[in-house]
């Protein structure tokens, strides 16, 4: 409105009084500057989203259909919450069954509705998370690195065997004895896309937290032990597990048969 007033006054050949002219000019400059600043911010957001390099996973062999999840466990949600603890010691050389692994994968990102809803809520149904399985010792599943496909409750292999330097990348000792480990990663750009290019990174982090809690409760209900960890070599982990560069890693979740631990757990 200020710019229109100034334009119309000049067009009609009228002169503004100095007491009015300078405030109008200053306010007009402020409005133009603010608009330019907003344009630059929005342009940067859309530019980052649109220009971000997108990689895809390369799969090996056939897709593996997992056993259907059990929807009627014998442990109540309340009992699982009461008994939940971070368990870092696992029985050596004890395998998990493919049914146990399938159940935990489903709890992390399983599809629960025909329209795509999952076990974990996601802002605007963006679903930016991915789950990678490192299978060391699982009945009826060859050792290797797999990507979980929620809509099919299935696995696709991405690395033929467990990388020799996986324990080095994991850093913490509990991962060495665990027969399986789950890695939660997420793509911030998918969340931004759901919000018309506006960055909402915090939503992705919150969503990873929901998945982590599901892992705890599901493991507890199965009589298994787990602990969520963020203390690992992210760059090396992404490289050896063939996780696309646009994804950030949030959690490393080892799971195994719990062994007797000394000291306090949390």
Image (cartoon, rainbow, N blue to C red):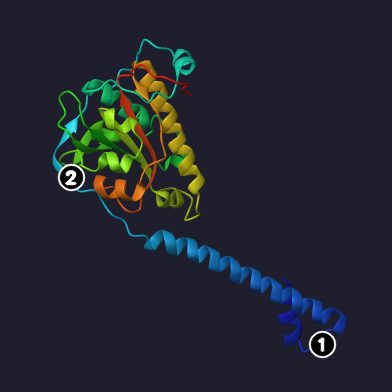
Which labelled disc corresponds to residue 216?
Answer: none
**Residue in view at x 25 percent, y 45 percent:** 241
The image position of residue 4, as x and y in percent, is 71, 76
Rendered view: 167 above or below 97: below
Residue under circle 2?
A: 59
Q: Nearer the viewer, residue 257 or 26?
A: 257
Residue at the spot 60% in from the left edge and 69% down from the top edge? 37
Quadrant of the image containing the N terminus: bottom right
Q: Where in the figure is residue 22, as x and y percent of width and height?
A: 80, 81
Residue placed farthest to the bottom in the image?
A: 13
Q: Nearer the viewer, mark 2 or mark 1?
A: 2
Instruction: Tell me if mark 2 has few (under 14), some (14-19) or many (20+) residues whose alpha carbon lies within 10 angstroms of its own.
Output: some
Q: Which residue is mark 1?
A: 15
Residue at the extreme left = 61
Q: Is residue 114 visible?
A: no
The residue shown at (41%, 27%) is 214
Q: Is residue 249 visible?
A: yes
Q: How many numbered circles are shown?
A: 2
**Residue 150's spot in the image, x, y percent?**
30, 34
Along the viewing direction, whichever of 152 and 158 lies nearer the viewer: 158
Query: Disc 2 and disc 1: Cα gap in Å?
Result: 73 Å
* Residue at the far front in the pictured view: 262
4 on left or right of 15: left
Up/down of 119 relative to 30, above or below: above
User: Where in the figure is residue 142, as x and y percent of width and height?
Assistant: 14, 31
Mark 1 falls on what kind of element?
Answer: loop
Earlier residue among tags 2 and 1: 1
Instruction: Pick the residue in front: 192 or 24.
Output: 192
Q: Which quadrant of the view contains residue 218?
A: top left
Q: Is residue 171 above or below residue 13?
A: above
- Find residue 71 and report its image quarter: top left
Is 85 on the left or on the right of 156, as rendered? Answer: right
């Amino acid at each position: 409105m200020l710019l229109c007033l100034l334009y119309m006054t000049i067009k009609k050949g009228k002169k503004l009084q100095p007491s009015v002219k300078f405030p109008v000019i200053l306010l007009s400059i402020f409005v133009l500057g603010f608009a330019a600043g907003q344009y630059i911010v929005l342009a940067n957001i859309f530019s980052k989203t649109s220009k971000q390099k997108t990689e895809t996973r390369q799969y090996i062999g056939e897709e593996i259909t997992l056993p259907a999840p059990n929807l009627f466990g014998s442990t109540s949600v309340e009992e699982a919450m009461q008994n939940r603890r971070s368990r870092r010691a696992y029985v050596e050389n004890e395998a998990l069954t493919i049914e146990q692994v399938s159940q935990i994968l489903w709890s992390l990102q399983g599809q629960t509705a025909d329209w795509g809803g999952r076990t974990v809520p996601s802002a605007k149904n963006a679903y930016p998370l991915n789950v990678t399985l490192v299978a060391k010792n699982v009945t009826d599943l060859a050792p290797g690195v797999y990507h979980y496909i929620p809509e099919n409750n299935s696995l696709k292999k991405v690395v033929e065997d467990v990388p020799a330097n996986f324990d080095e990348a994991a850093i913490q000792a509990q991962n060495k004895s665990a027969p399986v480990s789950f890695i939660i990663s997420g793509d911030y750009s998918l969340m931004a896309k759901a919000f018309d290019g506006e960055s909402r990174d915090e939503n992705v982090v919150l969503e990873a937290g929901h998945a982590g809690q599901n892992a705890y409760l599901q493991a507890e209900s199965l009589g298994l032990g787990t602990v969520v960890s963020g203390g690992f070599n992210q760059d090396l982990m992404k490289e050896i597990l063939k996780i696309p560069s646009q994804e950030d890693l949030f959690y490393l979740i080892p799971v195994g048969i719990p062994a007797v631990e000394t000291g306090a757990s949390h």
